[in-house]
Image (spheres, helix red, strand yellow):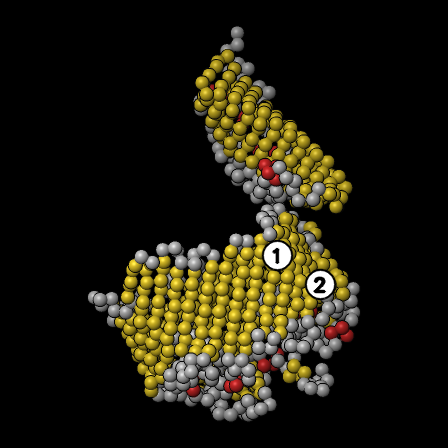
C-alpha cells in the first residue's frame, strides 16, 4: 500500500516543512554566484547550502515511498532569491528530475524573467529540456527559442532561436526593429562563448546580413577580443575611408585597441591605444599616425607634410583617500592634424596638456599642475609670404607653465567669532615669443611677454556674519596679501616693463558689508527685498605695467562680480583703492510654483587710484564699465515658471546715458512636443581692444518631437550687425529603447564672412547591446 498523503487547501495551501524539503533536496545546490546570461544555467536556482524551498499551490501531493512531490494549481516556488511559477511542478527524487508544466515563469535575483511551456531538468543541472522558451533580462533584452536542450559538459543548445533588444515588443504586439535569428545557437558555459549557426541579421523584418557561423562571447564576458563596429568617413582632402577597429583583451586588467582607416586620397591611418588598470588607478597610451600619399592636398596649411600623427597619454591614480595624481598629455605633429582627420578634442582651437597632483579634505584643498598648450589652427601667414618661411608663429606665443600651485584652507577654530582662511598660489611660466596684437592704427596690446616669470602669493582672510535683533546683517571682513615676484623678460621692446628683478608687494584690505532682507508675504506669494551695501578700503595698486599680467587679463563686470572683494580674475593684478558697491536683490516665489530673482547695482571708486583706469600693457580694465569713478549699472533677472520655461538676462548700462553696453539674454522652453532655446548677445564697440563696431548675434536651437520616437532638430546662429548667417544645421533623429538613428547637415561660416563655407553631413546608427557607429562627410567648401 502506497503511503500517499494529501494536503488540500480551499484556495491555496502553504507548505514549508521538512518533508517537502527532503523530497526536493536535489534542488539544494552548492553556493555560487548566479550567471548573468539568458541561458539554462541562469534559470535554474542556485542557493546557499541548507536553503529551504517554500511552495505555494492550490494543492500539494507527496509520496514518501516513491519520492515524488506534486504541486498543482497556480504553483509558486520560492527558493532563495528565485521565484518559479507554473500550473504544475513535479519533483521526482528517485529519477532526480524536476518538471514544471504549463505557463512556466522564473524570476531570478537579477530581475530577469524566463518563460516556457514546459521544463524538465536533472537536479544537478547536467541535462534538461525546455519547450517554447523565452527570456526577458534586466537589461530589457529578449531571447526566444522553440526548444532548449542542455547536455552534460555545460553545453546548452537553443534551436530556432532569436535575440533582440525590445523586451516590450511581445506584450505590445509589434515586431522588433532588428533581430538576430539562427537555426541553432550553442552556448558553451565553460568557454563563455555563444556560436550562431545559419544566422541572419534582420532589420524591419528583412534579412540584410547572413553568417554561416559566428562565435561571440556570452554576455557574462565584459571584455573579449574581436572586431568592433566600423566607422565611415569622407572629405575632399582625405577621400573616402572606413575605420576597422579590433579590440584585443590581453588580460583582465589591460588591453589594446588597434584600428586601420584606409583612405583613398592619403593612404592608411593607423591608430593604436593601450589601456592598463592597476591597483591604484588607470592609464592609457595612444599613437595615431599616417604617411600621406597626397600632402599637396594640404598645401598652404600646417598639414603640408609627409608624416603626420599624435601621441597621447592620460592617467589617474589614487595615493590615499585624500590625494590623487595623474596626467593628460597630447603631442601632435602639427596644428591641424586633429581637425583634418576628425579626431575628437575638448576644445577645437587649443590642446591642453597637464600633469597634476591634488589633495582635498573637508576644509582644505591643494592642487599643483604643469601646463602646456598646443594651438590647433594654422599659423597666420604674412601677406605675399612663402608659407614655409614667413609665419607669425602662434605656437611660440603659448606659455609653458611650470607649475601653478593653489592651496586653500579654512581653519576649524573661529577667530574673533569669525572664519579665518588662507589662500596660496605659486605660478611660474616661460614663453618663447611675445604675444602682441596691433591693428596698424596705433593700437597695441601685449597678451604675453617673452621670458620667464614667477610669482608666489599668500593671503589671510577673515570674516564674520552678525545678525541683529531686527534682521540687519553686518559682515565685517579683512585680508592681508603678500606677493613675491621674479621677472626675467627676454623682450626689451615692451614699454614700461621692468628688466630682471625680484619684487615684493603687499595689499591689506578691510571692509564691511551690510544687508537688510525684508520679507513680504501676500496672496500672490512670498517676496524678499534685500538692499546691500559694501565698503572696501585698501591702498592703491602699485607698479601697474611694471610686471607682466598673465592670469588676470579676463575681466567681465556684471551682477555676479558686483560684490567681489577683488574683481580681477587672477593673482597677477590686485584691486586697490577705496570702493563702495551697492545694490538691491529680489527673490520672489509664487503660488503657481514659479520663481523670480534679480539684482541691480553699481560700484563707486571713492579714493586712491582706480585699478581699472590705470594704463597697462594688456589694457585690462579698459571698457569694462569700472574705469570711471561711477561704474556702469549692472543688472540680472531670472525667471523659472516651474513648468518648463526658463528666462535669464544680464546687462550693463552706461553710467551717464544708460545706453546698453553689454547684454546676454537666454531662454529655454518646453511646450508640448517642442523644446528650444534662444540666445541673444550684444557687446558695444571696444576700441581699446580693437573692436571698432558693435557686435550683436542671435543663436537658436530647437527640437520637435514628431511622435514617441521621431524628432527633427536644428540650430541657427546669425550675425545681426553684419547680416550674415554664421552657422546653421538641420537634422532628423529616431530613438527608442532598441535602435537609434540620426542624420544631420550643417554649414559653418564662423571663420570669416566671405571665406568658403564648411559643409558637413553626419550619420549615426545605434543598436542597443550591440554598439554604435557613425560617419561624417565633408561635402565641399
Mark 1 surroundings: few (<14), some (14-19) or many (≥20) residues within 10 A? some
Which label sits in the foreground, 2 or 1?
1
Disc on res. 118: none
Q: Can I make out residue 340 in this image?
A: yes
Q: Which residue is mark 2?
A: 777
Q: Residue furthest left?
A: 469
Q: Earlier in the sequence, mark 2 or mark 1?
A: 1
SS of the residue at dot 2?
strand
Residue 638: quarter of image: bottom left
SS of the residue at dot 1?
strand
Q: Can I make out residue 291 in this image?
A: no
At horizontal 68% and vertical 53% (from top left) the residue drawn is: 228
Alpha carbon distance from label 2 to label 1: 20 Å
Disc on res. 712: 1
At horizontal 52% and vertical 21% (from top left) the residue drawn is: 73
Instruction: Measuring from the top left, give residue 365's x and y in whole percent.
Output: 41, 67
Instruction: Measuring from the top left, give residue 289's x and y in whole percent.
Output: 70, 67
Choose between 618 and 523: the one closer to the eye: 523
342 left or right, relative to 549? right
Amino acid at each position: 500500500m502506497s503511503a500517499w498523503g494529501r494536503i488540500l487547501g480551499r484556495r491555496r495551501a502553504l507548505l514549508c516543512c521538512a518533508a517537502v524539503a527532503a523530497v526536493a533536496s536535489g534542488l539544494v545546490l552548492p553556493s555560487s554566484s548566479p550567471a548573468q546570461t539568458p541561458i539554462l544555467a541562469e534559470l535554474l536556482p542556485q542557493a546557499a547550502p541548507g536553503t529551504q524551498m517554500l511552495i505555494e499551490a492550490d494543492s500539494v501531493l507527496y509520496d514518501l515511498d516513491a519520492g515524488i512531490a506534486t504541486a498543482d494549481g497556480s504553483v509558486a516556488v520560492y527558493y532563495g532569491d528565485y521565484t518559479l511559477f507554473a500550473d504544475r511542478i513535479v519533483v521526482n527524487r528517485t529519477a532526480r528530475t524536476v518538471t514544471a508544466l504549463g505557463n512556466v515563469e522564473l524570476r531570478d535575483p537579477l530581475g530577469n524573467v524566463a518563460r516556457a511551456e514546459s521544463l524538465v531538468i536533472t537536479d544537478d543541472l547536467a541535462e534538461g529540456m525546455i519547450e517554447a522558451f523565452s527570456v526577458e533580462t534586466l537589461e530589457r533584452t529578449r531571447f526566444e527559442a522553440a526548444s532548449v536542450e542542455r547536455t552534460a559538459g555545460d553545453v546548452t543548445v537553443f534551436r530556432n532561436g532569436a535575440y533582440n533588444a525590445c523586451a516590450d515588443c511581445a506584450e505590445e504586439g509589434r515586431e522588433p526593429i532588428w533581430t538576430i535569428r539562427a537555426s541553432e545557437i550553442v552556448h558553451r558555459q565553460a568557454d563563455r562563448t555563444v556560436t550562431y549557426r545559419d544566422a541572419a541579421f534582420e532589420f524591419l523584418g528583412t534579412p540584410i546580413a547572413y553568417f554561416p557561423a559566428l562565435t561571440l562571447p556570452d554576455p557574462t564576458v565584459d571584455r573579449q577580443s574581436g572586431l568592433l563596429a566600423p566607422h565611415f568617413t569622407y572629405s575632399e582632402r582625405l577621400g573616402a575611408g572606413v575605420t576597422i577597429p579590433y579590440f584585443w583583451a590581453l588580460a583582465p586588467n589591460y588591453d589594446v585597441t588597434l584600428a586601420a582607416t584606409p583612405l583613398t586620397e592619403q593612404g592608411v591611418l593607423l591608430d593604436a591605444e593601450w589601456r592598463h588598470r592597476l591597483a591604484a588607478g588607470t592609464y592609457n597610451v595612444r599613437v595615431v599616425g599616417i604617411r600621406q600619399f597626397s600632402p599637396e592636398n594640404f598645401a598652404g596649411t600646417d598639414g603640408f607634410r609627409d608624416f603626420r600623427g599624435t601621441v597621447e597619454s592620460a592617467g589617474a591614480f589614487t595615493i590615499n583617500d585624500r590625494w590623487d595624481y595623474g596626467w593628460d598629455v597630447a603631442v601632435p605633429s602639427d596644428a591641424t592634424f586633429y581637425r583634418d582627420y576628425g579626431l575628437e578634442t575638448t576644445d577645437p582651437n587649443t590642446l591642453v596638456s597637464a600633469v597634476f597632483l591634488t589633495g582635498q579634505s573637508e576644509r582644505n584643498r591643494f592642487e599643483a599642475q604643469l601646463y602646456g598648450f598646443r594651438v590647433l589652427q594654422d599659423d597666420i601667414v604674412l601677406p605675399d609670404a612663402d608659407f614655409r618661411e614667413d609665419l607669425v608663429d602662434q605656437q611660440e606665443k603659448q606659455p609653458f607653465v611650470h607649475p601653478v600651485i593653489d592651496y586653500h584652507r579654512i581653519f576649524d577654530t573661529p577667530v574673533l567669532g569669525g572664519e579665518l582662511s588662507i589662500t596660496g598660489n605659486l605660478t611660474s611660466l616661460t614663453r618663447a615669443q611675445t604675444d602682441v596684437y596691433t591693428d596698424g592704427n596705433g593700437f597695441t596690446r601685449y597678451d604675453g611677454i617673452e621670458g620667464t616669470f614667477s610669482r608666489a602669493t599668500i593671503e589671510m582672510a577673515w570674516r564674520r556674519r552678525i545678525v541683529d535683533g531686527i534682521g540687519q546683517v553686518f559682515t565685517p571682513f579683512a585680508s592681508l596679501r603678500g606677493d613675491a615676484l621674479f621677472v626675467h623678460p627676454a623682450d626689451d621692446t615692451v614699454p614700461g616693463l621692468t628688466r630682471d628683478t625680484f619684487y615684493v608687494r603687499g595689499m591689506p584690505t578691510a571692509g564691511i558689508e551690510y544687508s537688510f532682507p525684508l520679507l513680504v508675504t501676500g496672496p500672490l506669494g512670498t517676496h524678499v527685498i534685500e538692499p546691500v551695501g559694501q565698503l572696501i578700503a585698501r591702498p592703491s595698486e602699485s607698479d601697474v605695467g611694471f610686471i607682466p599680467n598673465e592670469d588676470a587679463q579676463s575681466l567681465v563686470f556684471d551682477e555676479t562680480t558686483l560684490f567681489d572683494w577683488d574683481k580681477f580674475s587672477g593673482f597677477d593684478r590686485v584691486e586697490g583703492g577705496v570702493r563702495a558697491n551697492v545694490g538691491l536683490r529680489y527673490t520672489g516665489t509664487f503660488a503657481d510654483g514659479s520663481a523670480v530673482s534679480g539684482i541691480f547695482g553699481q560700484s563707486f571708486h571713492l579714493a586712491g587710484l582706480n585699478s581699472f583706469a590705470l594704463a597697462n600693457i594688456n589694457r585690462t580694465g579698459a571698457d569694462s564699465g569700472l574705469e570711471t569713478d561711477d561704474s556702469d549699472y549692472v543688472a540680472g533677472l531670472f525667471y523659472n515658471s516651474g513648468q518648463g520655461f526658463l528666462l535669464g538676462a544680464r546687462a550693463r548700462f552706461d553710467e551717464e546715458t544708460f545706453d546698453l553696453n553689454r547684454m546676454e539674454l537666454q531662454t529655454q522652453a518646453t511646450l508640448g512636443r517642442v523644446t528650444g532655446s534662444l540666445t541673444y548677445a550684444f557687446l558695444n564697440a571696444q576700441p581699446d581692444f580693437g573692436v571698432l563696431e558693435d557686435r550683436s548675434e542671435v543663436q537658436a536651437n530647437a527640437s520637435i518631437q514628431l511622435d514617441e520616437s521621431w524628432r527633427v532638430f536644428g540650430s541657427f546662429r546669425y550675425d545681426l550687425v553684419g547680416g550674415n548667417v554664421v552657422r546653421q544645421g538641420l537634422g532628423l533623429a529616431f530613438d527608442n529603447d532598441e535602435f537609434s538613428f540620426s542624420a544631420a547637415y550643417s554649414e559653418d561660416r564662423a571663420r570669416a564672412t566671405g571665406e568658403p563655407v564648411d559643409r558637413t553631413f553626419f550619420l549615426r546608427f545605434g543598436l542597443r547591446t550591440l554598439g554604435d557607429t557613425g560617419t561624417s562627410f565633408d561635402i565641399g567648401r
